[in-house]
């Protein structure tokens, strides 16, 4: 069977992590990155083809010979670049499926309308996972992002915990920790500084992994 | 205050939105304004509006034109034309496509420095201008004012 071919354009950390896992799953993966240093690091991944250049330029995509690839994934930090990458891949190079990462959720509909097959918005993906996970009663890491350095975890608040009955702004959390959502009675709310945390709530915490433990302690006493 | 706005909206039913107040954007916006046309100019940097002529009397918006709320502020749905002339080709492409697809602006033009991308985007229903191709053509005209014998031949055979 012919291996499915995937091209990843831009996005150093995301490309590295995706490339590793896709190659393991048996795909033939090509990465294009305009930063030479990033390319050198990507090239250390076994069996990953790496091209240095601006993937929004047709001749770079041609150099990487992405003609007829199965999937193109645009991972740069700019929405406009990701749009152009996907459009070029689809219309000029006949790539079957295009995936674009976007940072501005209000542009999702526009990207779909322009023929992008899959639009992934970091913010909305996180929110939807949070909704799905509403009823877990243990501390669980939901999503590691950025090579696992950032974690999204859910923390149940037991009765008598330090956070019980206190406002979000009165809980002393480490600086790099954010309460992203308070799940209560099956619904989620995005907290403000004056939202009160109650026993029985499940908090969704976004934190760097080094501060997660301290944050859990400040909230639950454990 | 709202009365004044409504009145001027009604008066200027058709206007041009210029995205990017660089040399080209400022020049076009200024000359359209001097001709009495309605103009809205958008740029991220307040400084850039200094390039507009002193007589410019269009609307000025400081903001990122790739954000929908900025385009709403410019009332893009009521515009008769949009010119995307920022320094970045991909920004111009995206703004032009947003204007065409989301707001149905009848005339949409993007300036693209890279002529290779231009070939692709001409098929997408947005007008493109490329300084490289325009200059090449113009230089050709200056150097060879008469059609070459080969071209003349072509015309005859058709």
Image (cartoon, coloured by chain):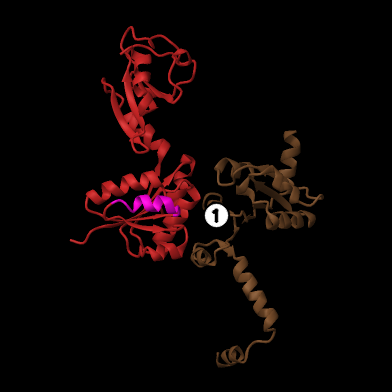
Chain colours: A red, B brown
Q: Can residue B63 be seen at all in this image of the molecule?
A: yes
Residue B20 picture location, percent across and down: 64, 51
- SS under mark 1: helix
> What residue appears at the point 33 percent right and 6 percent down from the top-left corner?
A160
Residue A105 picture location, percent across and down: 46, 40
> What residue appears at the point 55 percent right and 57 percent down from the top-left corner?
B89
Which residue is farthest left? A1
Quarter of the C terminus of chain A within the rendering = top left
Residue A71 picture location, percent across and down: 32, 55
| Residue stretch rendered in magenta on the structure | A34-45
The one of B55 and B158 positioned closer to us in this rendering: B55
Q: Can residue A184 be seen at all in this image of the molecule?
A: no
Which residue is farthest top? A160
Q: Is residue A111 left or right of residue A67?
A: right
Q: Residues within 10 Å of mark 1 (few under 14, many from 20)?
A: many
Give above or below for B31 relative to A78. below
Residue A218 picture location, percent across and down: 38, 14
Give above or below for A128 relative to B56. above
Which residue is farthest right? B55
Q: Chain of mark 1?
A: B
Q: Is residue A85 left or right of residue B11?
A: left
Q: Quadrant of residue A159?
A: top left
The stretch drawn in magenta includes residue B141: no
The one of A200 and A31 positioned closer to us in this rendering: A31
Quarter of the N terminus of chain A within the rendering = bottom left
> What residue appears at the point 35 percent right and 24 percent down from the top-left corner?
A212
Q: Is residue B61 left or right of residue A110?
A: right
In this rendering, the count of numbered labels is 1
> What residue appears at the point 32 percent right and 44 percent down from the top-left corner?
A17
What residue is shown with label 1? B100
The stretch drawn in magenta includes residue A40: yes
């Amino acid at each position: 069977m012919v291996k499915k071919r995937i091209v990843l354009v831009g996005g150093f950390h995301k490309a590295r992590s995706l490339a590793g896992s896709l190659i393991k799953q048996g795909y033939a993966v090509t990465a294009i990155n305009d930063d030479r240093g990033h390319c050198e690091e990507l090239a250390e991944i076994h069996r990953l083809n790496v091209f240095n250049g601006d993937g929004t330029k047709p001749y770079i995509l041609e150099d990487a010979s992405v003609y007829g690839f199965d999937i193109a994934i645009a991972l740069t930090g700019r929405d406009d670049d990701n749009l152009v990458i996907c459009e070029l891949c689809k219309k000029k190079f006949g790539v079957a499926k295009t995936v674009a990462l976007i940072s501005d959720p209000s542009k999702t509909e526009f990207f779909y309308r322009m023929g992008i097959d899959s639009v992934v918005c970091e913010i909305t993906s996180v929110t939807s996972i949070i909704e799905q996970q509403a009823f877990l009663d243990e501390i669980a890491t939901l999503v590691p992002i950025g090579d696992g350095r950032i974690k999204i975890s859910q923390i149940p608040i037991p009765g008598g915990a330090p956070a019980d009955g206190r406002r979000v702004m009165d809980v002393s959390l480490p600086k790099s920790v954010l309460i992203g959502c308070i799940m209560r009675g099956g619904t989620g709310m995005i907290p403000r500084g004056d939202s009160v945390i109650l026993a029985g709530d499940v908090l969704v915490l976004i934190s760097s992994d080094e501060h997660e433990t301290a944050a859990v302690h400040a909230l639950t006493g454990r | 205050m709202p009365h004044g706005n409504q009145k001027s909206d009604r008066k200027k039913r058709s206007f041009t939105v210029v995205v990017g107040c660089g040399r080209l954007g400022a020049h076009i916006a200024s000359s359209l304004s001097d001709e009495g046309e309605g103009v809205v100019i958008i740029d991220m940097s307040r400084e850039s509006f200094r390039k507009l002529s002193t007589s410019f009397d269009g609307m000025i918006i400081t903001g990122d034109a790739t954000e929908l709320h900025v385009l709403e502020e410019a009332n893009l749905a009521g515009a008769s034309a949009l010119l995307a002339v920022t320094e970045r080709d991909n920004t111009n492409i995206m703004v032009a496509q947003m204007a065409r697809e989301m707001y149905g602006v009848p005339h949409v033009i993007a300036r693209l420095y890279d002529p290779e991308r231009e070939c692709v985007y001409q098929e997408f229903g947005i007008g493109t201008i490329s300084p490289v191709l325009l200059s090449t053509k113009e230089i050709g005209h200056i150097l060879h004012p008469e059609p070459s014998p080969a071209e003349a031949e072509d015309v005859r055979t058709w």
